[in-house]
Image (cartoon, rainbow, N blue to C red):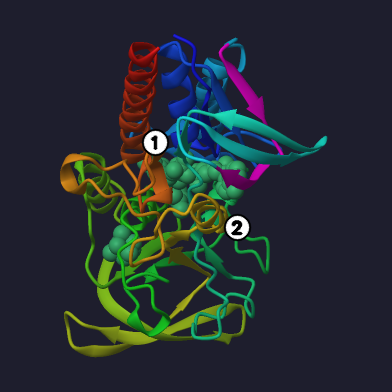
Amino acid sequence: MEHNPILVIGAGPAGLEAARGAADLGYKTLLVEKAPVLGGNPILADYAAITPDMENAERAMKRMIDAIIEDPLVEVRSETTVTAAAGDAPEITVTLAGPKGEEQITVGSVIVCTGFQHFDPGRETQMYGYYEYDDVITLVDCERMLKAENFVQPSTGDKPKRVCFIQCVGSRDRQIGNFWCSKVCCGIACKEAIEIREMVPDCQVFVFYIDMRMYGFWEDEIYWKAQEDHKVNFIRGIVTEITKRGDQVVIKGEDTTMGRPVEVPMDVVILSVGMEPSEGTTETAEIFQMPLESHGFIETVGGALNTVTTARPGCFAAGASTGPADLEDSISMAGAAVMKAAGFLRKHTLAASKSV
Ligand SMILES: Cc1cc2nc3c(=O)[nH]c(=O)nc-3n(C[C@H](O)[C@H](O)[C@H](O)COP(=O)(O)OP(=O)(O)OC[C@H]3O[C@@H](n4cnc5c(N)ncnc54)[C@H](O)[C@@H]3O)c2cc1C
Ligand code: SF4
């Protein structure tokens, strides 16, 4: 059956899985990635290990990349974006802008996998001092140090003695308009807390939380492991201010279980930043005229029974482009999106062959 290729936009975990799935089903696939490298946030943000198996992130992503890179049905274009789209599926003409200039290609169906960006804690509405104090870092900065196997207090280069995580930074925050839960940061904080305790056994680790939201099996397991096996201290509380005293940063806030004010010095403070729609997600939605849902991610219209179909016929979305998602969610959605895209093309090709 002749058909135009399936266009997958974004080569993170979701996009790589979508491209692999489409090719496995025998469909020509064009995978477009704006970064020079494939692998999405796990590679671009230098994740160390990924849950649930704590596999080295680079190795895990390489496995996904290897699965498509030699496949004759998959054409990969890195450093490339879609800048315009005209017509309707199964004949959408897209304009690609890449290293060799602009080119127009007709595609049959589209799967958007443009992912998320990490919340920038330097916004003026935030009081965490991220851009003021070297020792206030994010989950991503922490991943980089863990990957380098060198977890230190940034301002001194020494091994820290006291580290804390602050949860829900840029999430569940009506003041800044991000009122959603980012879903992965509780689990990731527990993961990093364990890694820090393993790397720097003398270091005490604290987690300040509103409530810990452990969504699935791996999150739940890692939470108990952090507490029971690695003696991570969980404090239900609200942090209202971070200041500097000598070599340390001081956390001020309230312990909401005990109902008393807290003022504790730390060597390193790690902000558990949330997930926001990436710029690429917003731009791609506009190009393909896909409505966004109320949080700014791509809206899918099938409710609980169809999580990947967008309002634009023949166009689907998967992974963190549709909302906060862990790897399991992203990969499962990519599989569902491929199935829908293949079904869409097959129906149209059959209808066309009957009408001849
Ligand atoms: C610090 C941290 C650690 C994490 N660790 C884990 C973990 O251990 N386990 C787990 O299950 N989950 C983890 N996650 C969540 C995980 O990162 C996401 O589930 C996953 O990255 C989502 O994959 P994705 O492909 O949807 O999006 P992304 O990883 O965001 O990939 C999107 C891709 O699309 C590309 N793109 C964007 N715009 C365009 C455009 N216009 N044109 C072309 N390409 C574009 C981007 O460059 C990127 O390559 C972690 C999250 C954080 C914040
Ligand atoms: S996953 Fe945890 S840290 Fe992240 S927004 Fe939800 S409750 Fe807050």
Query: Between disc 1 and disc 2, whose residue precedes?
Result: 2
Q: What amino acid does circle 1 point to?
A: Gly
> Is 187 colored magenta in this rendering?
no
Q: Position of residue 87 (x, y in %)?
A: 53, 41
- Residue drawn where x is 40% and y is 34% of the image: 54
Residue at numbered disc 2: 152
Looking at the image, residue 6 lies above or below residue 24? below
Q: Residue furthest right?
A: 100
Q: Residue at x 47, y 54 (%)?
A: 289
Q: In screen coordinates, is 105 left or right of 252?
A: right
What x and y, as percent, mark residue 227?
25, 53
Local secondary structure at mark 1? loop
- Of the numbered discs in the image, which one, if any, rests on residue 299? none
Residue 154 lies, in percent from the top left, at: 65, 64
> The C terminus lies in which quarter of the figure?
top left
Work out whether 225 lies above or below 19.
below
334 or 285: nearer the viewer: 285
Q: Nearer the viewer, residue 37 or 187?
A: 37
Q: Nearer the viewer, residue 17 or 215?
A: 17
- In magenta, the rendered stretch is 73-86
Magenta stretch holds residue 75 = yes
Residue at the disc numbered 1: 314
Residue 201 in view: no
Q: Looking at the picture, which amino acid does disc 2 mark? A: Val
Q: Residue at x 54, y 26 (%)?
A: 59
Where is residue 16 drawn, in percent x and y?
Answer: 50, 29
Rendering quadrant holding ligand 2: bottom left
Q: How many angstroms separate mark 1 from mark 2 (CA)?
A: 49 Å
* Badge 1 residue CB within 8 Å of ligand 1: no
State which mark lies toward you, 1 or 2.
Answer: 1
Q: Residues within 10 Å of mark 2 (few under 14, many from 20)?
A: many
Q: Quadrant of residue 172?
A: bottom left
